[in-house]
Amino acid sequence: MSAHCMLTGAKPGFGNRVSHSHRRTSRRFDPNIQTKRYWLPSENRHVRLRLSTKGIRTVDSIGVEAAVARIRARGVRI
């Protein structure tokens, strides 16, 4: 799966590795994506979300119901 957060939309950034001799080669900065399972009381089931660590903190502060509503508003199927 791609390194993409369902809630925040965080995705890989790109840049250069710079060696000691200052030669540049391409590299990729991946977000810290974790798979986390949450209980969704309104649907009486668990949902498995692929979230960045910032997304996990967001779910902790706004609640899983509001987070799932935001994810569905972005057009992601859960």
Image: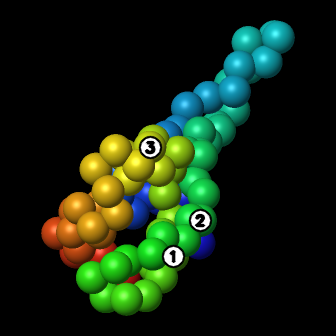
Amino acid type of the residue tagged 2 in the rendering: Thr
- Residue located at (56% from left, 65% from top): 36
Q: Which mark is residue 35?
A: 2
User: Residue at label 3?
Assistant: 57
Is residue 12 visible from the viewing direction of this image? no
Q: CA distance from mark 1 to mark 3?
A: 16 Å
User: Is 17 located above or below residue 9 in the figure?
Assistant: above
Q: Which mark is residue 48?
A: 1
Give the spatial CA distance, label 2 vs label 1.
7 Å
Instruction: Name the residue at 64% across, 37% down.
Output: 26
**From mark 3 to mark 2, how far is it between C-alphas?**
13 Å
The three-letter code of the residue at mark 3 reads Arg
Residue placed most toward the observer, 21 or 66 = 66
Say which residue appears at 59% left-offset and 39% top-offset.
29
Q: Quadrant of residue 76?
A: bottom left
Mark 3 and mark 2 residues within 8 Å of each other at the beta carbon: no
Judged from the image, the secondary structure of the residue bearing numbered disc 3 is: helix
55 and 18: which is toward the camera? 55
Q: Is there CB contact under 8 Å for labels 2 and 1?
A: yes
Q: Is residue 20 left or right of residue 18?
A: right
Task: Identify the amino acid type marked 1.
Answer: Arg
Corner quadrant of residue 69: bottom left
Residue 37 location, x and y as percent?
Answer: 54, 71
Relative depth, front residue between 29 and 71: 71
